[in-house]
Image (cartoon, grey):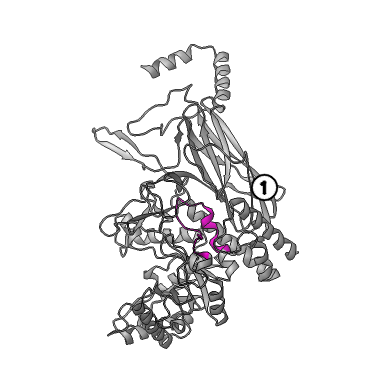
Amino acid sequence: MRKAHLIVSLMIIAPGVLVSNIKAQQKKNLQHVKLTVLNSMERIGQDQALFGQPNAAIKAAKNEVESFQVVIHAAGRNIVIVKTEMSDLTGKAGTIKKENIALFREEFTRIRLSTPRATLPPGLYPDPLVPFIEPQTGKPIEPRNQSVGPDGAVITKGYDMYAQPFKVWAGQNQPLWVDIAVPKNASPGEYKGTLSLYIYNDTIIDIPQNDGVMFPVKSVVNDDKQSIYTVDVSLTAWDFTLPDGPTHRNNFGKVNRRAAAAFGLDQTSPEFREIELNYCKMLADNRINPPIPDWLLPEINEDGSLRVTDERTRLLKKFLQDLHVTDLPVPDALLNDTLTVNREKAIRYYKELYRYLKDNGLEKRAYLYMFDEPNNKESYEKVIALGKLIQEAAPQLRRLVVEQPYAQNPSWPDIDSAVDIWCPLFSFINRKAINEKLANGDEVWSYAALAQRAPDYSSDYNEVKNYDPPYWAIDQPLTSYRMPTWINMQYNITGLLYWTTVYSDKSVTGVMDPWFLPVFTAGGEHFSGEGYLLYPGKPCGINGPVASIRLKNIRDAMEDYEYFALLQQLAGREAVVKIIAAIVPNWWAKPTDKDFLTVREKIANEILKVKK
């Protein structure tokens, strides 16, 4: 009755009065909406006081993705955003089409218990990025809706997690994330455009309510029923181009049974292959080398020899080319029991595998992730034995061991002869020890895990024991994800490792959904977001992952390293280190988001200056 009464009332009002009232209401509606712009390293809580800038102004190289955020604040009453769209970016330099721009609604995730050494309190944090356009179909995600069919059966369509429409409650914030991919062929210069928000004037027209749905799914929105709010966006495209694949070496773990379990699938099933490839593509799109799916590599015969097919080789090469893979971790198959009955089988396997890689021009950046954290004497002995086996089978294959480049215990055997790539935790980094390994021709990577300070067996322990490196947890600043490549450049470390992007507790007996509790538990403590940079897309109807804000900041860190590499090629390593040392002199430095952006721009200007 209420809706019918409203319609009748509107019909008997004089047309001129109605238009005047609508315009007045639109103006009043805008007073209930406040917008602000944040950079990619800032975050805002649901109930936090607004901060930021009125407009978006970003700068990027060609073939780079740069991001900003728009925060919508409902001041005084609830508002409903029914549509968000981005225009083309235009200027004297030309046009960057809106197809190069991706929009996401930031979902909040709950931090129930603080991570050890957390610098931020428990609460709700924006992290998952729900896409406005479903990446596989190219269409918007349909909101979940139920209706009753002619036969009385309930018909359910759509999904629980979607980008729009969405409501912002009075006094609360809803941030949006914007990715702008600058094309390789973009002309340098300034581009401008507009992000528009269409806000439903729900005080004029009553919003239909559907059971289980907060907003109207199929309502017709006319000009007289909405207000449009805009944010100006400017992009400066610098005149240099980033490479397609990452220069900084990296390994972020496998897309394995945990990802499959989130979709209710076996990781060896044909149905999971499409999902696995979509996970790999998202990692590659964010400048992380994806893991190589097992079904693209040659099969292993009973005696350890390879069963090579032209089709698998073709698909492997296509995968590496399409996803711009620059590092190739070879499988650790047969390593677990190679030191007993299967030693000859393992030698045959790695000998033939390396020959296969070389025959196909894939051996140059291949390496074996041979052992993870050998934390006792027996493990050190096993590292030595495995190292000898690989040396015998494929002497040119580099062997990576996740261990600091100095002895944990002087009474344990020396593993130097078995290791080609050392990989210490951030807090285990010791400049003197690293330089010694580099001088001997070894390589050094670094890795993040949990929240560990320097060990008491480090030679500089007394100096650094109370300092914290960047820890990767949701309740840490986003600058923690931006900093590692800067540390690595400072210390001449050439790679970055993270143990997985798809961790979930109970992954074998039942998935713990990271949308509601993204936590890794160790020693009775919660590590929020540990091992989880990707959320399963199932609640959105996506056969693949949903990115996190933390993943985007790692992407930006990888892009920063491309700046370092370009300037190093043009002006030498010391020119780069001199600039970045101003904010990252060592691994316990605490630069701000503004520090990163200022120094990044300085490096860009140096590239442009030397490039001329």
From the top left corner, tell me how far across and down residue 565 is, in percent.
62, 67
Q: Residue at x 74, y 62 (%)?
A: 609
The extreme front residue here reads 462
For residue 571, side relative to residue 312 (left or right): right
Q: Residue at x 31, y 33 (%)?
A: 147
- Which residue has dot 1 on it? 191
Q: Is residue 482 magenta?
A: yes
Question: Please, what secondary structure does the residue beneath circle 1 have?
Answer: strand
- Is residue 197 visible to the viewer in this orientation of the structure? yes
Q: Is residue 405 magenta?
A: no
From the top left corner, tell me how far across and down residue 83 is, in percent.
50, 36
Q: Residue at x 43, y 67 (%)?
A: 291
* Res 572 quadrant in image: bottom right
Please tell me which residue lies in front, 278 or 583.
583
Q: Quadrant of the N terminus?
A: top left
* Res 266 quadrant in image: bottom left
- Is residue 129 visible to the viewer in this orientation of the structure? no
For residue 291, side relative to residue 557 (left or right): left
Q: Amino acid at mark 1?
A: Tyr
Q: Residue at x 32, y 77 (%)?
A: 336
Location of residue 251 with respect to 181 vertically, above or below? below
Q: Residues within 10 Å of mark 1 (few under 14, many from 20)?
A: many
Q: Main secondary structure of the magenta part?
A: loop
Magenta-tinted stretch: 464-486
From the top left corner, tell me how far across and down residue 188 is, in percent.
70, 55
Q: Quadrant of the C terminus?
A: bottom right
**How many discs appear?**
1
Please tell me which residue lies in front, 158 or 598.
598
From the top left corner, tell me how far across and down residue 227 is, in percent.
55, 29
